[in-house]
Image (cartoon, helix red, strand yellow):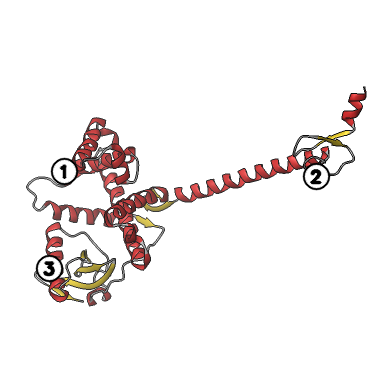
């Protein structure tokens, strides 16, 4: 009985666990304040509510971000291209270029321009891919029609060619092997569709045929993009201001592109004695333009008339 009364008149310190008299406000052992039962209960409830609130905030942020990423960055004939897929492919390409050209390629003002160029290129690539897949589907080609064995053989061929392990391959592509397989499956479907349906034998230059076919299909497609990225700062020929094609790029056959690039690089080298530059060829319809790019910046713009180049 005395022991029970003793326990009733004693308080337990929540910090060190030692017994103190009920009237004590501070623990005689550790010096910390002694919380009464009501205070302890309130503190526990407060911590619990705080934890629940934190979980709710994190959950809401997660769903907001996921919802944003799952929104379409573009639509092709009503079929969306999600921001998530776009960012995934952009990050993969970014890692590839960084591994090849160094981390500085996307730093500074020139790096921003490089990133904008990359994003525009990736989005255009995904739009074109979506159109090609839609056309392939119309012709009866589907992703499931490619045997898994064929995909595995392609992966092994890549590993042999570049002498890569699975981990090296993942690092190079900036993603998983399943991502790579999905890309290869898409490429194979498109390739088979084009070879059997578009690029029929005996019809002439396959590059030119494909360029003309794709230009026509794109013109008939309903393409909507919901985000714009900064474009390259380039000069335009006088014809682009008169409305002949409005400066809208269209496909160009591979032979002409190579010739234009070679002529432009030769011209620039003779003019500046510089070789370590790039050349970007664009067919604006009214003229073929070649932009000379040095360290991510356009340093010279030329037109190509099929024989020679001329500064804009």
Q: Name the residue under label 2.
A: 33
Residue linked to disc 1: 195
Q: Which badge, 2 or 3, is on the more N-terminal residue?
A: 2
> Which numbered tag is attached to residue 263?
3
Please name whichever residue, 311 or 211, is drawn nearer the observer in this view of the structure: 311
Task: Say which residue appears at 28% left-offset and 52% top-offset.
Answer: 128
| Callout 2 crowding tier (Cα within 10 Å): few <14, some 14–19, many ≥20 | some
Q: In which quarter of the image is the C terminus?
A: bottom left
Tell me what residue is drawn at x 58 percent, y 46 percent: 58
Quadrant placement of the N terminus: top right
- N-terminal of the two: label 3 or label 1? 1
Picture mark count = 3
Q: Where is residue 119 in the image (x, y as percent from the top left)?
A: 34, 57
x%, y% of residue 223? Answer: 34, 55
Q: Residue extending furthest top?
A: 1
Q: Residue 281 vs residue 203: left or right? A: right
Mark-to-mark CA distance, 1 and 2: 82 Å
| Residue shown at 33% from the left, 61% from the top | 104
Q: Position of residue 211 (x, y in %)?
A: 18, 55
Answer left or right for 201 relative to 230: left
- The CA distance from mark 2 to mark 3 is 84 Å
Residue 79 visible, this orientation: no
Is disc 2 placed on a helix, strand or loop?
loop
Under circle 3, the secondary element is helix
* 285 shown above or below 119: below
Q: Which of marks 1 and 2 is nearer the N terminus?
A: 2
């Amino acid at each position: 009985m005395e022991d029970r009364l003793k326990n009733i008149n004693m308080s337990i310190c929540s910090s060190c666990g030692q017994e103190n008299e009920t009237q004590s406000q501070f623990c005689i052992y550790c010096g910390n304040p002694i919380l009464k039962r009501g205070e302890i209960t309130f503190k526990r409830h407060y911590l619990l509510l705080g934890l629940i609130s934190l979980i709710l905030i994190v959950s809401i942020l997660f769903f907001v971000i996921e919802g944003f990423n799952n929104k379409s960055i573009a639509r092709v004939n009503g079929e969306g291209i999600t921001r998530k897929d776009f960012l995934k492919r952009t990050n993969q390409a970014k890692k590839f270029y960084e591994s090849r050209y160094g981390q500085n390629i996307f730093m500074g003002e020139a790096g921003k321009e490089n990133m904008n160029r990359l994003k525009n290129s990736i989005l255009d690539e995904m739009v074109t891919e979506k159109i090609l897949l839609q056309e392939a589907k119309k012709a009866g080609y589907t992703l499931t029609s490619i045997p898994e064995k064929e995909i595995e053989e392609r992966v092994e061929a890549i590993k042999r060619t570049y002498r890569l392990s699975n981990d090296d391959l993942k690092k190079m592509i900036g993603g998983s092997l399943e991502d790579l397989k999905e890309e290869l499956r898409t490429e194979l479907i498109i390739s088979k569709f084009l070879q059997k349906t578009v690029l029929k034998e005996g019809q002439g230059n396959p590059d030119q045929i494909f360029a003309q076919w794709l230009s026509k299909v794109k013109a008939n497609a309903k393409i909507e993009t919901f985000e714009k990225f900064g474009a390259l700062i380039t000069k335009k020929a006088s014809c682009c201001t008169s409305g002949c094609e409005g400066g809208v790029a269209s496909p160009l056959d591979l032979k002409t592109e190579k010739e234009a690039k070679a002529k432009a690089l030769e011209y620039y080298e003779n003019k500046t004695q510089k070789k370590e530059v790039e050349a970007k060829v664009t067919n604006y319809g009214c003229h073929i333009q070649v932009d000379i790019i040095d360290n991510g910046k356009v340093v010279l713009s030329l037109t190509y008339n099929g024989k020679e180049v001329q500064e804009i």
